[in-house]
Image (cartoon, rainbow, N blue to C red):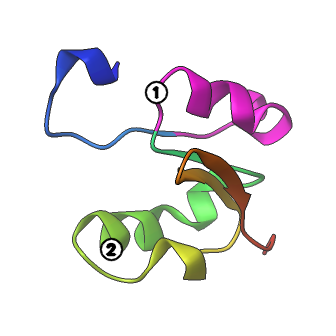
Amino acid sequence: MKKLKLSKYYFAGGYGSTFSPEEYLKIGFDIACIGESDLIIRSLINYFSGKPKKENIKSICYLENNKIKFNKKS
């Protein structure tokens, strides 16, 4: 997905990203939601708009310096 060089952000939610978030990051998603992604949609939209920091969003997984980071679950 990143090869397309679009200025968009991609996040995964649902059953797949809850149990295999690393796989979604490997194929190009920016963030993988763990658990009920509908509960954190507002936080993700705010993050993509420039606030808050992704370290403060619960129940997500993302890459930082090529390392997978898991935030606390909500």
**Viewer-nearest residue: 18 or 62:** 62
Residue 8 figure quarter: top left
Left or right of residue 33: residue 42: left
Of all residues shown, which one is farthest toward the right? 19
Cα gap from disc 1 to disc 2, whole angstroms: 21 Å
Residue numbers of the magenta segment: 12-29
> Would you call the spot at circle 1 few (<14 residues within 10 Å), some (14-19), or many (20 or more)?
some
> Would you call the spot at circle 2 few (<14 residues within 10 Å), some (14-19), or many (20 or more)?
few
Residue 47 in picture, x, y percent from top left: 36, 71
Label 2 residue SS: helix
Q: Quadrant of the N terminus?
A: top left
- Point out which mark residue 60 bears: none
Which SS type dominates the magenta stretch?
helix
Q: Disc 1 vs disc 2: Cβ atoms closer than 8 Å? A: no
What residue sits 16% from the left and 25% below the top? 5
Q: What residue would you read off at disc 1?
A: 28
Residue 12 in picture, x, y percent from top left: 55, 37
Left or right of residue 26: residue 73: right
Left or right of residue 63: residue 1: left
What residue sits 74% from the left and 51% below the top? 34
Which residue type does callout 1 highlight?
Gly
Q: Is residue 23 above or below residue 74?
A: above
Mark 1 and mark 2 lie on one chain; the one further toward the N terminus is 1
- Point out which mark residue 46 bears: 2
43 is within the stretch colored magenta: no
**Viewer-nearest residue: 27 or 59:** 27
Which residue type does callout 2 highlight?
Asn
Left or right of residue 8: residue 16: right
